[in-house]
Image: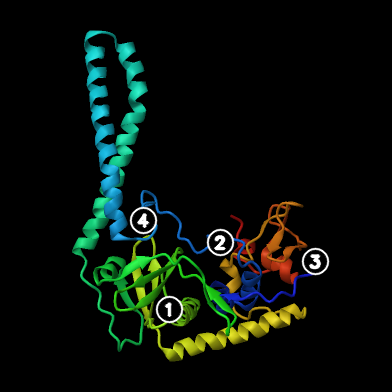
Amino acid sequence: MTNESTFIEPIDVTSLGSYVFCKRAGVIAYKQQGLDPDSEEAPRVPNLSYLPDFSIEELRERFEAELPPFLRFTAASLCGLVAVWLIARFVSVSLSFLILIAILFLIWKALSDGLLLLSIIAELAKYKNASPAVLSPTATEPVEVMWYELVKAGFKPIKPRGRFEDQDLNLTGHPWRLLQSTDGVRIPVLNYNGENFQVRDSHVMRLALYSHLCKVCMRGSSSDWGILLDVKTKRCFAIPIDDKLRLNATLKLDFFSKVLADDRENKKTPIPVLTPCENCRFGKPRPFVPGKSETVFFAGAISAFPQDGRDGKLVHSDCGDKFEWLPPHRYWQSDE
């Protein structure tokens, strides 16, 4: 295995979330910080690529921008179809078929733009019918709300332009979005892309640290909530965050820092005691291809620790390479 740099890079909030899930996952996430700058971005939902910020203003602007070309393509398509019908009836069926092929792009563009506009109208209707969310200051448990209920309550979604940092904690982070109000409230938002939408400890710890960073980097702002958003359904869990929770998160960060310090001294991080490995992306085997499938950290690539896969071909994983073991991923439990 190659020597690793002793440079102590600030811990990203996402790495702390991985650490809460599994210590070994946390170590790997830390060592891969910065290699995938878009890892926090939500995947584009089909026909909803116009919603990068889930913003009503952007929806309206996009509708106004898409309507004129839709009308032009629709008019051109209708004129073309009329021409095809007339030529087929009075001139030549084969010639009309050739003309129909020529205008298929116009028809396709009119249909796709029409579906886009209908999707925007549906989203605007959801916003119009939403009731403003009320986040009680006395809440102690997560509250389920819809995204547009938060927007209707006066919160504006923005994408932070830069990273937040707390040098005292050696902590850095970039929330996926912030919900902000005119009275100084800043609510960090996490996107959720998987199945079985639910709040986990790793989500709570990440939101608590983002809340801490908001208060540190945006002097005078209030940040006593965090939002976990399912980007497919726009269901949300609003999670109350107080000083006790922020303190708990910073204690987790301190424990994580000690694990990373041990790793720098080549002390093996303990094997997880429960079963976080089954669906862990770091333990998922991939085909071993020399020179192409290496596990890469910000300090460089490390040597592979290949195993015989189910089909007899060599496979390896990030976690297997780093800790030289066979993570019990569900890959090994199935013949699929």
Amino acid on which disc 3 is placed:
Thr
Where residue 22 sits, quadrant-wise, is bottom right
Task: Name the residue tied to disc 3.
Answer: 2
304 and 77: which is toward the camera: 77
Task: Name the residue tied to disc 1.
Answer: 218
Crowding near pointer 1: few (<14 within 10 Å), some, many (20+)? some
Q: CA distance from mark 3 to mark 1?
A: 41 Å
- Mark 1–mark 2 CB contact (< 8 Å): no
Earlier-in-chain disc, 3 versus 4:
3
Tell me where residue 75 appears, x and y as whole percent: 23, 30
Tell me where residue 209 appears, x and y as whole percent: 49, 80
Amino acid on which disc 2 is placed:
Pro
Earlier-in-chain disc, 3 versus 1:
3
265 and 20: which is toward the camera: 265
- Mark 3–mark 4 CB contact (< 8 Å): no
Task: Name the residue tied to disc 2.
Answer: 37
* 283 horizontally vs 193: left or right: right
Q: CA distance from mark 4 to mark 1?
A: 26 Å
Crowding near pointer 3: few (<14 within 10 Å), some, many (20+)? few
Quadrant occupied by the C terminus? bottom right
Please tell me whether mark 4 sits on a helix, a strand or a loop: loop
Image depth: mark 4 or mark 1 in front:
1
Tell me where residue 242 appears, x and y as whole percent: 40, 88
Q: Is residue 321 visible?
A: yes
Q: CA distance from mark 2 to mark 4?
A: 19 Å
Outermost residue, top direction? 91
Amino acid on which disc 1 is placed:
Met
Please tell me whether mark 1 sits on a helix, a strand or a loop: loop
Task: Name the residue tied to disc 4.
Answer: 51
Earlier-in-chain disc, 1 versus 2:
2
Amino acid on which disc 4 is placed:
Leu
